Image (spheres, grey):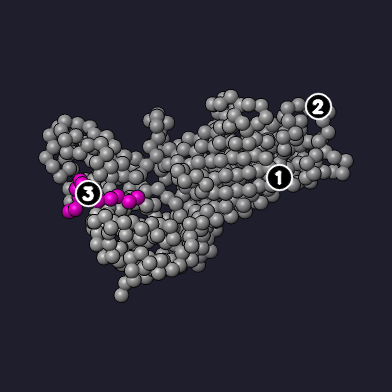
Amino acid sequence: MNSEDTGAEQRLVVPGDQIDAPPGSQPGSGVLLRGESLVATKLGRVQVNGDTIHVVPTNTTYIPRSGDLVIGYVEAVMNNLWFLDVNGPFNALLPMSLAPWKVEFGAARQYMDFGDAVMARVMEVDETHSVVTTMKGVGLRKIKEGFIEEIPPHLLSLVIGSNGRTLQRIKEASDCRIVVAQNGRILIDGDAEGMATARSAIDIIVKTGHAPGLHDRLSSVIGGDE
Amino acid sequence: MGGYGDVQLMREDGKRLDGRAVDEMREVEIKAGILPAAEGSAWVKHGLNIAVVAVYGPMEAHPRRIQRQDRAVLDVRYNMAPFSTSDRIRPGFNRRSREISKVTAEALESVVLVERFPRSKIRVEIEILAAEAGTRCVGITAASVALADAGIPMKDLLVGVASGKIDDIVVLDLDKAEDNYGQADLPMGIMPNTGEIAFLQMDGDLSPEEYELATEYNFKAAHEIHGLMKQALLDSASGGEV
């Protein structure tokens, strides 16, 4: 079980802070090497992963990476492609050739229109952050039912838990299908009561996930696991 | 510098009109994460100055001509509220606010790791709610806290501080009377951890020795303010916990 999952206190740092680390440590995400010392570039908690030091930010925006599963909303429709809002700095492209339907030129709007939600996968991100997504793949589809909860992307690991245990607990207690997309959006699909249970569990994780005792607080909503 | 009148700004006991010593700063209070709609925000009270800053982004840069293929651009908007001074300020951009927005953006670009977000824009809105000399420095300090609160990667925090000269004496952190009737003003943007200066302006005349002393005062104040900035960020980061 990693330290994030147990909610153990980790040292908070602000940008510019020097991080005390054993000699030979490598800078990970949110850390920069200045001369011999490691310096934090983000407000967050120090996390040691082997000999790599990371700063897990307390607040961040989603930056797409290829292979990410994302839930996007259609922002604009052209003749042969859709623009998706994937919660990142830029809209992502979904060309009609990568949609699961055989779409004729000019008929894109008949399949998906402005405001529709889709489950897609990031296929390509170039160095200028242009993002191309695809809907060809298992489970990638237009979302027609369920609720989409949006949380800060850096808290996803807390929702999933080590080996997916926390997510499994929520699924079992709420009897809902839950899909966690890497852009901080979570699809919850089930009956109304179950969806409410799952949403309150996620809310607890978002608000108090980093403090010790998360397991017990979750138990008050979704019951204890064996 | 409003003028070199015969206004006496130092008291006979060696203190300034408001009772501060020459190297004493006005009181500073900082809060981070105060605006729920913004990705990052800060509130700074420095003497009678009050600034609120909101940070949005990174987002797609519009209009497209401002995009840079290799880095993000900082879209800084400094604005004084119409009620921030005793004379009503006409709302909207003016020559002064354009200049301050530009220098603030350039100062912040040297601490923000802009190369991490090519083609995008980070919007920084600085709103001065109350003004009493030194608002550009307060704006820089608040913007830097708000950027850190938004999770934007930065190599250091940036602190805005100013020193100046009144009655031929170098003093730290000018108030309104000292700013209007003093002889010089030296605002700086300082990175406290690296000791680099990201922003420097000078109004009035200082001898090399006076400049050295003013810089020394600025660095001393920057370290004090940096401590408060850090505390505000740490409080905000741990605020949501049980």
Question: Is B138 left, or right, of A213 in this rendering?
Answer: right
Q: What is the three-letter code of the residue carrying label 1? A: Arg
Tag 3: residue type?
A: Glu
User: Magenta segment, which residues?
Assistant: A138-150
Task: Determine crowd level at label 2: few under 14, some 14-19, many 20+ residues with C-alpha closer than 10 A.
Answer: few
Classify mark 1: helix, strand or loop: loop
Position of B94 with respect to A60 (left or right) is right
Give yes or no for residue B165 being in the magenta stretch: no
For mark 3, name the chain.
A
Whether residue B14 is visible here, answered yes or no, is yes
Q: Which residue is mark 3?
A: A145
The subunit carrying tag 1 is: B
Q: Residue at x 17, y 38 (%)?
A: A111
Please state if A153 lies on the left or on the right of A32 as rendered. left
Q: Which residue is mark 2?
A: B5
Say what secondary structure mark 2 lies in. Answer: loop
Task: List x then y, in percent, for residue B206.
Answer: 74, 35
Q: Amino acid at mark 2?
A: Gly
Considering only order in the chain, which callout, 1 or 2, is on the residue closer to the N terminus?
2
Name the side, left or right, on which A98 lies relative to A54.
left
State the residue at coordinates (81%, 36%).
Answer: B9
| Residue A167: x %, y % from top left | 30, 63
Mark 3 lies on a secondary structure that is loop
Q: Residue at x 54, y 49 (%)?
A: B32
Q: Is residue B215 above or below residue A14?
A: above
Determine if marks 1 and 3 fall on one subunit.
no
Q: Nearer the viewer, mark 1 or mark 3?
A: 3
Real-space CA distance between mark 2 and mark 1, rounded to the nearest whole angstrom: 24 Å
Q: Position of residue B16 (x, y in %)?
A: 80, 41
Which residue corresponds to mark 1?
B26
The picture quadrant where one finds residue B128 is top right
The residues bearing labels 1 and 3 have C-alpha atoms spaced at a distance of 57 Å
